[in-house]
Image (spheres, rainbow, N blue to C red):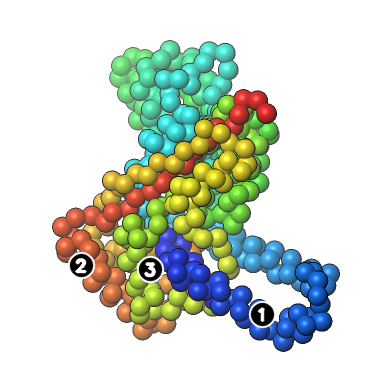
Amino acid sequence: RRRLDDETAMNPKMLLAAAFAQRQRCLQSPTLAKRAVICSTRAMATSSDENEIKSSGEANEHRFFEMEQRNWEQGFEAYDEGFGPLTCQTIPTLLSDGGFSPANVIDERRQFKLLDVATGPGFVLTAAIDAAMKLDLPEELYSNLKFTGLDITQNFLQMAKQRINAQLQEQQQQQQRQHKQEIQFNIDFVEGSAESLPFNDGSFDSIVCNFGILHFFHPDAFLRESYRVLRPGGRLSFSAWAPPMATEGFRIALESIAEVGNPNVEGLPDGPNFFDFGDPNQATNALKEIGFVDTKSVELSEMKWTSIQNGSELYDVLLQGTSRTREVLLGQTQEEAAAIASLMIQKYDAITDSGKRCLAMPAVITSGCKPTST
């Protein structure tokens, strides 16, 4: 079976070919062929077959979740260093389109609550807190802002806590030097699943998710849950990578694996198409189907992978700081892995003129609003 890797995936033609091949294998099964002759109705599976299919699907979903959790527990530092400088480039637009504009969220009458789903290293929350601190408001109004970071891994949550604690300590020192009262923020960290958010209905004014939706087995469940826990008038925004023809780092890995490696690594759980939400129309339609209004998608075409200086670094970051890509690369033979790494170096040099420019890595930010009335 063709498998999607993490920050790389099969191109559309390969995906269609893989899906067709898998479908043909099912149709060529003697059991199914026999049923096709016997049955003239559309419901060709018995209840036993349906239970088996359901059980198989649930097992695949469980394996997918375990893979994501395991690899992020291991790869959190590599992701922080390798992807951090790149993914941070989406944050200003992500927060703005998600309804978090500090000048407009301070309200003496109630709290403004921001949820960062798949908070990872905490970059989004750090930026939101930094933007709030620059408002120079009366200290008591800052307590009306509440920030919550959610992730499935304790290592990422701990990293986010440490980053934000360091930020707040620096801020406190500055306040003391200026003889100002210390600013107090409400900040929570929650371990949990984006597909079953552990919050009450209407809990948040703004929900943001920076590249997390690519790692959910049921991204539509995340969108529905976001709709549920948003208050009427609240906004959701999320980021996703543009297709691999535009995102040069992913294209290098994709082509290298296809040309000299094995893209058919056995034993990996099936997962959703990594680049689904890089299609603006598909992304906005997914929000509209759930009930979001005022939807839009914006491509950030100027994003550059400044932290990657050569093809060897690209290979290492994808191996150590991803989930599905890591599994695909680990599934190669020693000879295949060496060939992939070597070809990625060659392709990087060809695309960047031997490192004279950075890799282009555009992203798409999609957002929508929960209606004030239904």
Q: Where is residue 297 drawn, in percent x and y?
A: 44, 41
Q: As displayed, is residue 111 above or below residue 195?
A: above
Q: Mark 2 sits on what residue? A: 350
| Residue 298 vs residue 227, the one in the foreground | 298
Mark with earlier residue (1, 2)? 1
Residue drawn at (56%, 54%) of the image: 216
Q: CA distance from mark 1 to mark 3?
A: 29 Å
Residue drawn at (29%, 63%) of the image: 313
Q: CA distance from mark 1 to mark 2?
A: 43 Å
Identity, as a three-letter code, of the amino acid under mark 3 = Leu
Report if the CB atoms under discs 1 and 3 are less than 8 Å apart. Answer: no
Q: Where is residue 91 drawn, in percent x and y?
A: 39, 39
Mark with earlier residue (1, 3)? 1
Mark with earlier residue (2, 3)? 3
Nearer the observer: mark 1 or 2; the answer is 1
- Quadrant position of residue 369: top right
Outermost residue on the right side: it is 47
Q: Mark 1 sits on what residue? A: 27
Q: As displayed, is residue 260 above or below residue 348?
A: below
Residue drawn at (56%, 42%) of the image: 287
Label 1 Cα neighbours within 10 Å, binned few <14 / some 14-19 / many ≥20 = few
Residue drawn at (25%, 69%) of the image: 347
Identity, as a three-letter code, of the amino acid under mark 2 = Ala
Identity, as a three-letter code, of the amino acid under mark 1 = Leu
Q: Where is residue 236 drawn, in percent x and y?
A: 53, 36
